[in-house]
Image (tube, rainbow, N blue to C red):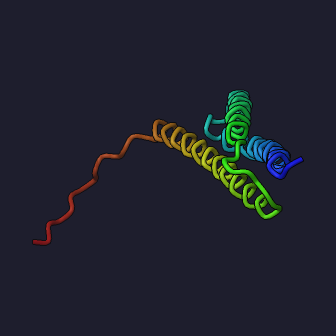
Amino acid sequence: MNATVITYGIYLTIAFPLTIWVARNLFRNGRIFLVDCFHGNESLADSVNQLLVMGFYLVNFGFVALYLKIANEVLEVRGIFEALSGKLGVVLLVLGVMHFFNLYVFTKMRKRATWDQAPPPLPPTGHIANKA
């Protein structure tokens, strides 16, 4: 078995469990945030949380699979580490970008919802004196 095939095996052995671990942590710890975004509607928050996890799995497993190919033949142990560090680094960056994109979207939703529920502004009670 050559080093390239070994690199593929190690990459998949690390990337898939890493994706599962991140998804489970986001699912477990993101629930409170989603419940707040949906104003206490726990069933809606849980449903959206499940859908987000499913989408997260599909996108990341698809990316890991598409990103499997190594352009150059891996020849030594050093090459295995270099190929793995590059591949896994990109996978981690994609996981992070997806996480922050989701946070951005739900934070925007939350701000819009709280803005709509804010009381109307109060009329001015007086005038500011002109110092000129």
Q: Residue, x 62% and y 34% (percent of image)? A: 38
- Does residue 126 appear anywhere in the picture? yes
**Foreground pick, 14 / 76:** 76
Number of numbered markers: 0
Q: Residue, x 48% and y 39% (percent of image)? A: 112
- Furthest toward the left, the residue is 132
- Furthest toward the right, the residue is 1
Is 57 above or below relative to 70?
Answer: above
Where is residue 76, by image quadrant?
Answer: bottom right
Is 85 above or below relative to 20?
Answer: below
Which quadrant, please, contains the C terminus?
bottom left
Is 86 above or below relative to 64?
Answer: below
**Foreground pick, 77 / 84:** 77
**Foreground pick, 111 / 11:** 11
**Image spot of residue 96 (x, y percent):** 65, 50
Q: Residue, x 72% and y 41% (percent of image)? A: 64
Is 79 above or below relative to 95?
Answer: below
**Image spot of residue 54 (x, y percent):** 73, 31
- Does residue 42 appear anywhere in the picture? no
Q: Residue, x 72% and y 53% (percent of image)? A: 88
Residue 121 is left or right of residue 76, and the answer is left
**Foreground pick, 27 / 76:** 76
- Furthest toward the bottom, the residue is 132
**Image spot of residue 3 (x, y percent):** 83, 52
**Image spot of residue 41 (x, y percent):** 68, 31
Residue 126 is left or right of residue 67, and the answer is left
